[in-house]
Amino acid sequence: ILNVEQSPQSLHVQEGDSTNFTCSFPSSNFYALHWYRWETAKSPEALFVMTLNGDEKKKGRISATLNTKEGYSYLYIKGSQPEDSATYLCAPGDGANNLFFGTGTRLTVIP
Amino acid sequence: DGGITQSPKYLFRKEGQNVTLSCEQNLNHDAMYWYRQDPGQGLRLIYYSQIVNDFQKGDIAEGYSVSREKKESFPLTVTSAQKNPTAFYLCASSPWDSLGDTQYFGPGTRLTVL
């Protein structure tokens, strides 16, 4: 079992603000880091998968970075919009492709 | 449309009864997974299967059973031995090509034990 910590637990931002969250995980036995977005009443949706130290991924206004040596990943949202409101989950994966999920960061974007 | 379906969306059962949650996928994925979510906790892995007729226990398998007779289907039975079965259950599937394969999730089943 990998102990995964996400912070903050929740946050509220104004529309147009940029924000970021943190995911911390043990750097040993690490193979890949997944980010998911989970909107209320929907299925979790994959955002990024990162495997290499220093990896950076971008999808529209959302981007993520990975530091495998120190065991953390950041997710950034630029110019938050109300449709970005969701819970963002990070999940490192082990050698069997099993994922270990954090409790998530619940983002609310206020119009 | 390709995807993962779970049924039913809401399920109620009396204490002491077994209940089976359905999960079907038409994505031609080899691997399938069952997770459980409780308030304030991350998703926890119950069982997973990488190939038909084979499955492994996850972190919290006690009180659950699964079968994988077909590639498309991975039903989960919550038995009366599960001490605290009320939870939200998510099924997922993924290809089994390489490490880092994305898992695709179904809409979930909320089980309430009365």
Image (cartoon, coloured by chain):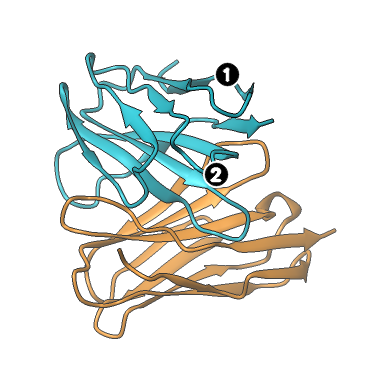
Chain colours: A orange, B cyan
Question: Is residue B45 placed above or below A58 in the rendered structure?
Answer: above
Q: Residue furthest right?
A: A111
Left or right placement of residue B14 versus residue B79 in this view:
right
Tell which tag, 1 or 2, sits nearer the viewer.
2
Identify the subunit bearing mark 2: B
Amino acid residing under circle 2: Asn
Identify the secondary structure beneath mark 2.
Answer: loop
Left or right placement of residue A105 versus residue A12 in this view:
left
Q: x and y percent of residue A95 in the render?
A: 16, 57
User: Are both tags, 1 and 2, on one chain?
Assistant: yes
Amino acid residing under circle 1: Pro
Around disc 2, counting alpha carbons within 10 Å, would you say few (fewer than 14), some (14 to 19), or many (20 or more)? few
Look at mark 2 in the image and give the residue it sits on: B84
Identify the subunit bearing mark 1: B
Left or right placement of residue A5 versus residue B40 in this view:
left
Alpha carbon distance from label 1 to label 2: 19 Å
Q: Quadrant of residue A104?
A: bottom right
Q: x and y percent of residue A53 in the render?
A: 24, 75
Identify the secondary structure beneath mark 1.
Answer: loop
Task: Depth check: give the residue in front, A98 or A72.
Answer: A98
- Residue under the point 68% across and 62% down: A107
- Residue under the point 39% across and 59% down: A91
Look at mark 1 in the image and give the residue it sits on: B8
- Residue under the point 53% across and 47% down: B37
